[in-house]
Image (cartoon, grey):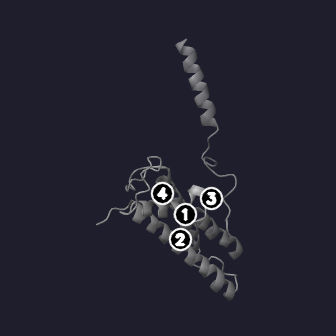
Amino acid sequence: MKNVAKYITLLISIIFLSNCSKDNFFQLERAPENPWNTPAEFEKAVIGVYSRGLADDGWNCNYVNWTLIKVSEADDVDWVNDPEWGYHRDSKLQNTYTSLVWVNSYQAIAGSNVALDFVSSKNNNPFPTASDNNQKYNVQRIIGELHFMRGYMYYLLTTMFGNAY
């Protein structure tokens, strides 16, 4: 019985190793494509960051949860005694709303970083064939909005989860 198991293991190993050659091992069949080929497509990068950072639906909205948590930490708030809310003037208490702010903020930061890395990889001129007006009023504006949203998300995270000095 042991010999049969050894032969089966040897056979499986040979099959797997015979499929791996140096030339095509871990090679992608299709290279990844650039997601933004025009300034109009690049606009989608900042729209996604705004959507994740500010304008999600219902209780999944970063700004609403952050504002509610910061208000409920104030000394004059007495209406948050309901244990279902889980605030009790302590933002370190992990609940659904605090974790949503954490996740959504870092998703918005990641989206900003991907788009800004794309700009950096193109020597800060991602669309060299775009007109001067398009460069000035669209591409540079989008880059500025990406920097702003990344900073604003860090601000939300710092004021909510950072310790005071």
| Residue 122, image x, y percentages | 59, 74
Is 135 drawn above or below residue 33 in the view shown? below
Real-space CA distance between mark 1 and mark 2, rounded to the nearest whole angstrom: 8 Å
For label 2, the crowd category at 10 Å Cα-Cα, with few meaning under 14, some 14 to 19 and many 20 or more, is many
Left or right of 81, for residue 123? right
Q: Would you name the residue on which mark 2 appears?
A: 149
Does the residue at mark 4 contact the one at mark 2 (Cβ under 8 Å)? no
Q: Which quadrant holds residue 34?
A: bottom right
- The numbered mark at residue 102 is 4
- Of circles 4 and 1, which is in front? 4
Q: Residue drawn 50% across and 58% down?
A: 101
Q: Would you name the residue on which mark 3 appears?
A: 57
Q: Residue drawn 53% across and 62% down?
A: 64
* Marks 1 and 3, the one that precedes in the sequence: 3
Q: Would you name the residue on which mark 1 appears?
A: 108
Does the residue at mark 4 contact the one at mark 1 (Cβ under 8 Å)? no
Does the residue at mark 1 contact the one at mark 3 (Cβ under 8 Å)? no
